[in-house]
Amino acid sequence: MSAAGAFLRAAPALTIAAMLGPVLAGMAGVAAPAFGWFPALGGDEFGLAQFRALSRLPNFTQAAWLSFSTGMAATLISLAIVALIMAGWQGTCAFRVIERALSPLLAAPHAAAAFGLAFLIAPSGWVARAFSPWATGWEQAPDLLIVNDPNGLALIAGLVAKEAPFLFLMALAALDQVQAEQSRMVAATLGHGRVSGWIKTVFPRVYPQIRLPVYAVLAFSMSAVDVALILGPTTPAPLSVLVLQWMNDPDVALRFRGAAAAMAQLGLVVAALGLWRVGELLIAVLGRRWVAGGGRGMCEPALRGLGLFVAVASAAAVGAGLLGLGLWSFAGYWSFPDFTPDALSLRTWARSLPTLAAPAAATALIGLAAMAAAMVLTLACLETETRRGRRPSRAVWLLYLPLIAPQIAFLPGLQMLALAAGLNGGTGAVMLGHLVFVLPYVFLSLADPWRALDPRFALGAGALGAGPGRVFLLVRLPLLLPPILAAAAVGFAVSVGQYLPTLLLGGGRVGTLTTEAVALAAGGDRRLIGVYALALTAAAFAPFAIALTAPRALWRNRRGMRT
Amino acid sequence: MFKSLVVALFALAAPLATAAPIPADRAAIVAEARGETVYWHAWGGSPRINAYIAWAGQEMAARYGVTVRHVKLSDTADAVSRVIAEKTAGRDEGGAVDLIWINGENFASMKAAGLLFGPWAEDMPNWALLATETNPALTSDFALPTDGLEAPWGAARLIFYHDAARLPDPPRTIAALLDWAKANPGRFTFPQPPDFLGVTFLKQALHDLTPDPALLQAPPDKAGFDAATAPLWRYLEELTPALWRAGRAYPQSEPRQMQLMADGEIDLAANFGSGPISAAIASFELPETARSYTLNGGTIGNAHFLAIPYNASAKAGAMLLADFLLTPEAQARKLDPVIWGDATVLEMDKLSAADRARFDAINLGPATLTPGALGPALAEPQAAWTPAIEAEWTVRFGGAR
């Protein structure tokens, strides 16, 4: 017991170290070359020369603006969709349908969703094919700039389709804690409509609980690389893509510029977060006036309809995009304007299946290990918190650091560090790297249900003579099995989607489904992209399915435990 | 005294000998390679090429007991980054990369930074079969001498391809291309520089437009660069508005460009080699009516290579693999468009009759050009032109317009 006790006491510190150590060390490894220090490439003087050169580049300002504007727009729209859906439809049938559609949307990897969306909306895409040539008269695809548009509208759409479901999930957890339904009824008796009543009474209490996830969405949207590569503008590309290009340029001197740009990206994210915070304060002031003003009029039906339409449309777009990619994986020759392929063929699958086995096994092994380690640390932290009877620490924002710091700003440094430490390109290094990103998600998914558990269960067990160990094993764990499995599924899905950490820390020797998929995506054959997109989605979705069904099977003879 | 000195020298030399095998000592290399695992970092974007590499791995295991692992890269520079990171961390042996599929700028930067093992390539038995006398691109990578630090693996020529059903008579000069594009706006594009193929198209246009192409074989100074490239920028000012999406977006890679052709978004595109066009027809990626051709007056030709990093863990296995890839058997298999469709670097006159028969037996496919139809090969401009053209293009056309 003393060893376990020591572990429990050390758990919070261990958790923080596992997450922050790599991020901070990696950032130092990128900051040094940004300021000119990189001995292997002949950089041995500190200075601001790289930043000056960067600011003089003709594309830099615009790339930075694109990064900022697309990230801000994607976050605002995602938040608006979530608020409108919750305000307009909570407690209805439509709401429950949306809730069910959530897991597959969350499980679909960003790159797969982006590829699907691109095939859907391109001028030669599925939507155009559905109406050509009989309605549009297009015998050949029109020359319209839809995907890769210079303002990044397609990129924003791709980001919203993936980030809105994430915010929705976070907001669902928060809703339980604020008695949303009662507030809405009170507002309704006072004559407020559904939407305005919710926004006036519930939103101000939900928002503080999802503030950090919103920040994570903002930071991610500003610095996403994979979605931007597929849907984003190219003349110029957003800053994150330029960073990657410079970091990978054959001219190794550009690595200094890449490092400086990565630091600029980090600064941009911090500035955007600051601006968002100012916006929050401003809205709070205006919102209070609006609430105090007591107005009742708002175009309620239009807002409800808009919310539902946008949510359903974006979910349908991801679904149809994945369906389209699935069809491509069976397609023979398939040209514009045919709505379906000339012929169906199993050839792509027959060729790919043998090569899928090894990466699928590696993906499962790494995902399970990272998820298990994250779960042990998370449970230990929460158990310690419960036993000591502490309130949740304000340090929770530290959990968001790995999610908020742009990956490209610290992973190259981390790679160098792992090499120096002798962790050379093995599965172990990749697992540790994944842990950095898996841990926050597992902790955030589990913390709220854990803290919401009625403490009287433990008190009752204690009164019957159970020690803290037995209370943990026989009372808390079984009661919390569904959220624990859900958190495990989230953690596994996060690990499945990691590209840069796997590539950089694995030295290319650790091939997962994601690294294979990105390498093949460079080849651009939609048939193969289809195979891997489906395999990836399945890999990330399977744990969600287990998390939903396993408790039901386990507790089939415990009526009170069924949910 | 003398004896002890010799002993001391041997003591010093012994660890070096185990760390780096001697390229010319074939027997020692075969013996040392047995049991090694060669991590071959190669672009992994094509399932056909991946399957070919997997075949080579099986053969290496059966013949020499060498395990080959294909590390599938989305960008060759990832492997270069890896070696740089290892050098930074002081890992001068036991590196993660054993063999890299490489050429051009990546080779130039690794050579300049001293990150390559060798010279080794010219000591391989199969080096004698290479067409080094007739194809200068095999020993000079973008006008930079290879110096035995890399072995040529395949050769490619810039070609253009079109769907003959949609476009029966494509333009055959750079000047005619402009007229055609203006008459058919939005139907031509090239992968966005710094993409390798996109830059090669720019270099082809530069070669055909510049007053004195001979100047491209030496590094340019600022004034020389401006004078030589002025006609290119004037040309692109006219061409760009007639490109796909009016030049406001570009495909990011050659395969993405091929997808545009298959989707019917463009009618004309450039590529490296005509074999891949036949191969793409065979795998449903292009219509059966796709055909390829080259420009009047010739197009740029280059080669791609295999190199070994200075800190590779399995140098003997890597050299053995490179030599195997230059056997007539491996080269003939690579030429087959059903397998890959990449041109060979071997000289047919140097092969035995039986080996020549392997090549003659291959059905090159409907869109593959015979050597006679390829026309003259133009040399790549000297390596310094490439980054200069990329940078200037990005300033002029890569930003918002």
Image: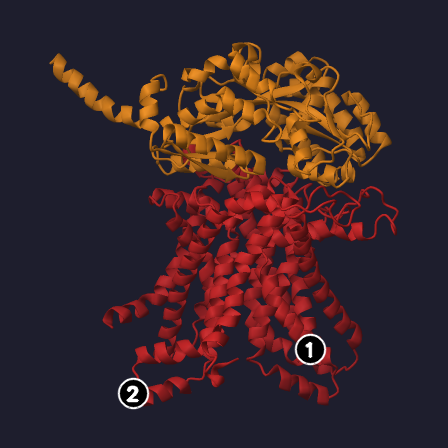
Chain colours: A red, B orange
Quadrant showing the N terminus of chain A: bottom left
Q: Mark 1 points at which residue?
A: A93
- Residue A50 position within the rendered picture, expressed as x and y whole percent measured from the top left: 53, 38
- Report the side of A293 relative to A557 (left or right): right
Q: Which residue is drawn at 59% across and 24% down?
A: B335
Q: Mark 2: which amino acid?
A: Gly
- Report the side of B371 relative to A402 (left or right): right
Q: Mark 1: which amino acid?
A: Cys
- Residue B338 position within the rendered picture, expressed as x and y whole percent measured from the top left: 61, 31
Residue B174 visible in this rendered orientation of the protein: yes
- Report the side of B210 relative to B336 (left or right): right
Sort mark 2 into few (<14), some (14-19) or many (20+) by Cα contacts within 10 Å. few
Q: Answer with mark 1 or mark 2, whichever residue precedes in sequence.
A: 1
Q: Residue at x 67, y 45 (%)?
A: A62
Sort mark 1 into few (<14), some (14-19) or many (20+) by Cα contacts within 10 Å. few
Secondary element at tag 2: loop
Q: Which residue is drawn at 37% across and 74% down?
A: A383
For the residues beneath circles 1 and 2, the answer to whether they share a chain is yes
Position of residue B260 relative to residue A389, above or below, is: above
How many numbered tags mark residues here? 2
Q: Write down the chain letter for disc 1.
A: A
Residue A73 visible in this rendered orientation of the protein: no
